Image (cartoon, helix red, strand yellow):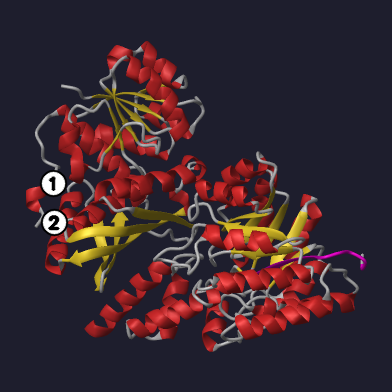
């Protein structure tokens, strides 16, 4: 078992975009892709934090449009595969066509973990064009192993080459990761990946646990650059894989160069675990809401903890930023009445 | 007089339409047809003593003189096929799929101009919820440069057809936003939320405008909400308009009437209620729904 190779999917330029309100520049994307390609990262995911077609008032306008981001990255990814994140209902098939034209290699089609039948049509569409497609289950802490297996099976039947579980709230603990990943590995016979967030300080541990349970693809980001308190730190996780005897295609020395480059040129604030990240993690709210909840609670002058509790009671899924405004507005009206 | 209704499609939309048609004093229900005799929808129709068939459009063609108008609640692809037959017999159809081969209609905006349309398309549920407000915004500023609509609906109110047609849903909603507001650019987003108890349908609009008249906006929003309330009583503001320089944000919640579908499924209720109001309008010819330009400041 210990000689298995783990595929590393670097989502710094996609999830990391959440951390800087989707303001990655052309130069940042270009220089990062060049160095990441040299470091041997298997897949480099690029785009708005919420994926293809997500630039909007609700989710934030990206500094660079999708087409430009992908074209620049395509030019620099000589060996690494270029990946995108796509959520049906957010992006359109016309945008998938654009990504196909540019030459994107890996299409990750995502939905909330219990709603995966919305991905079938996009998966079938891309498989019809012989693309590599992974089904992604977002907020996987909100469904048990059996339900996730059912959803993943549906995506597999639609043609998915693999399934990625996302712990989008950073809520999960290693035991949960192990149980859920095993259920998919034992029953599906396709690539299983894991995408962690570090709200409770468990991202690297959860990624290792996922690989132990049979996952063969791990999402990680440089210095943990990602939504909320960030993702699995790429440098650390590659080092631990080596210790455990799992192979990766990453060249560690070049990875260190990449890390220093990113720290100096891209990451304005190294992710840490703030009180708000623990709050969203505990409540199982999408980790990317952290900074947004802080801004909105201050705009509407409402208590951030009460706002979190109310949002949690409404069981928000990812990409419901508009509901945060509405709830804060309601809360501020109530406070005035009180 | 044209008031005998045939419904094609026996999913939750079709069956809610069935109850709304039965309830209407101006419409008579002739047929409910679908594809499967054992579908829960067909059984529900049978229990209500309605003539049903699993032969879909073929059945309707055989009984072409026994109805005056059709509600098509199938899917975009199926509607295109169904309409080939309906067109041959010049039958009036109200299309609830996002096929958009007919004239786009939001009752409060343009029902009057569509008195002669043979095929009326109801855009999407998110379109029916957002377009009245988008139209009110258009009439409260010089020009809209960008308009965005994000809708959250409960998982149980998103049927298989909606899930399969998601791309058409987005494309059609954006198309209609541009058409009715003259905005150059539009974006639509749909979120499906599985929370229990279920979330009520909610739609948020973001608009980038030139020269906003905030007094007019307030008045126009209130006027148009009251007009929509005539056919969807549970249509209400959830977020009063927030104006920040050239940007407007506002949100509505849509509670349905609970005829067949649960009240939180306002997304389905609003498109069905629009269909019924158009059918009733065409069966009489008195205009009680349309908003004239004069009513907006």
- Residue B288, quarter of the rendered image: top left
Q: Position of residue A40 (x, y in %)?
A: 79, 68
The foreground one among B2 and B233 is B2
Judge from the rendering whether residue A309 lies leftward or rightward of residue A19; answer left or right.
left
Which is more N-terminal, label 2 or label 1?
Answer: 2
Q: Is residue A5 magenta?
A: yes
Q: Position of residue A54 (x, y in %)?
A: 48, 61
The foreground one among B151 and A186 is B151
Tell me which chain the residue with mark 2 is part of: B
| Above or below, comparing residue A202 to residue B179 in the picture | below
Q: Is residue B16 magenta?
A: no
- Residue B110, quarter of the rendered image: top left
Q: Position of residue A66 (x, y in %)?
A: 53, 60
Q: Which residue is mark 1?
A: B291
User: Quadrant where the C terminus of chain B lies?
Assistant: bottom left
Residue pushed farthest left? Answer: B294
Discs 1, 2 touching: Cβ within 8 Å: yes
| Above or below, comparing residue A286 to residue A155 in the picture | below
Tell me which chain the residue with mark 1 is part of: B
**Residue drawn where x is 79% and y is 77% of the image:** A254
Q: Which residue is mark 2?
A: B223
Bin the neighbour count of mark 2 within 10 Å (Cα to Cα): few under 14, some 14-19, many 20 and up.
some
Secondary element at tag 2: helix
Secondary element at tag 1: loop
Judge from the rendering whether residue A258 lies leftward or rightward of residue A70; answer left or right.
right
**Residue drawn where x is 29% and y is 45% of the image:** B179
Judge from the rendering whether residue A282 lies leftward or rightward of residue A11; answer left or right.
left
Span of residues in magenta: A2-11
């Amino acid at each position: 078992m210990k000689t298995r190779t783990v595929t590393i999917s670097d989502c710094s330029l996609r999830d990391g975009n959440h951390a800087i309100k989707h303001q990655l520049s052309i130069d940042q994307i270009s220089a990062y892709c060049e160095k990441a390609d040299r470091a041997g990262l298997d897949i480099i995911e690029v785009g708005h934090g919420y994926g293809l077609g997500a630039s909007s008032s609700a989710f934030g306008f990206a500094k660079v449009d999708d087409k430009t981001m992908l074209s620049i990255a395509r030019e620099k990814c000589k060996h690494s595969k270029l990946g995108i994140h796509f959520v049906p209902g957010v992006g359109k098939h016309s945008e998938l066509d654009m990504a196909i034209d540019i030459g994107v290699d890996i299409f990750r089609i995502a939905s909330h973990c219990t709603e995966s039948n919305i991905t079938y049509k996009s998966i079938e569409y891309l498989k019809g064009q012989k693309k590599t497609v992974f089904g992604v289950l977002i907020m996987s802490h909100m469904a048990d192993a059996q339900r996730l297996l059912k959803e993943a099976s549906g995506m597999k039947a639609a043609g998915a080459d693999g399934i990625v579980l996302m712990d989008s709230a950073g809520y999960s603990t290693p035991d949960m990761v192990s149980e859920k990943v095993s259920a998919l590995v034992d029953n599906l016979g396709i690539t299983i990946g894991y995408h962690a967030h570090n709200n409770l300080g468990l991202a690297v541990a959860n990624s290792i646990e996922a690989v132990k349970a049979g996952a063969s693809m791990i999402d990680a980001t440089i210095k943990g650059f990602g939504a909320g308190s960030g993702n699995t730190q790429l440098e650390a996780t590659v080092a631990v894989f080596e210790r455990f005897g799992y192979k990766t295609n990453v060249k560690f020395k070049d990875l260190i160069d990449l890390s220093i480059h990113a720290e100096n040129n891209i990451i304005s604030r190294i992710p840490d675990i703030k009180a708000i990240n623990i709050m969203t993690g505990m409540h199982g709210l999408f980790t990317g809401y952290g900074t947004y909840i802080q801004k909105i609670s201050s705009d509407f002058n409402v208590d951030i903890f009460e706002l979190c509790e109310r949002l949690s009671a409404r069981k928000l899924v990812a990409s419901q930023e508009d509901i945060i405004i509405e709830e804060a507005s309601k809360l501020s009206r109530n406070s005035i009445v009180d | 007089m044209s008031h005998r209704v045939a419904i094609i499609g026996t999913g939750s939309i079709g069956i809610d339409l069935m109850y709304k048609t039965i309830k209407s004093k101006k419409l008579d229900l002739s047929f409910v047809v679908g594809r499967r005799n054992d579908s829960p929808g067909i059984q529900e129709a049978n229990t209500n003593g309605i003539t049903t068939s699993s032969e879909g459009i073929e059945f309707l063609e055989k009984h072409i003189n026994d109805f005056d108008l059709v509600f098509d609640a199938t899917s975009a692809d199926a509607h295109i096929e169904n309409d080939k037959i309906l067109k041959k017999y010049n039958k009036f159809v109200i299309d609830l799929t996002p096929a958009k081969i007919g004239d786009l209609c939001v009752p409060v905006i343009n029902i009057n101009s569509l008195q002669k349309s043979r095929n009326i398309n109801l855009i999407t549920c998110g379109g029916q919820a957002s377009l009245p407000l988008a139209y009110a915004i258009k009439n409260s500023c010089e020009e809209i440069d960008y308009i965005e609509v994000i809708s959250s609906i409960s998982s149980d109110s998103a049927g298989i057809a909606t899930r399969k047609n998601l791309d058409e849903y987005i494309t059609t909603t954006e198309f209609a936003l541009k058409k009715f507001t003259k905005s150059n650019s539009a974006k639509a987003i749909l979120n499906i939320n599985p929370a229990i108890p279920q979330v009520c349908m909610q739609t948020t609009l973001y608009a980038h405008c030139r020269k906003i008249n905030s007094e007019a906006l307030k008045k126009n929003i209130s006027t148009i909400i009251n007009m929509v309330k005539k056919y969807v009583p549970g249509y209400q503001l959830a977020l009063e308009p927030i104006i920040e320089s050239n940007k407007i944000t506002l949100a509505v919640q849509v509670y349905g009437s609970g005829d067949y579908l649960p009240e939180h499924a306002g997304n389905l209720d609003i498109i069905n209620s629009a269909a019924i109001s158009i059918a009733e309008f065409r069966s009489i010819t008195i205009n009680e729904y349309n908003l004239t330009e004069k009513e907006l400041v």
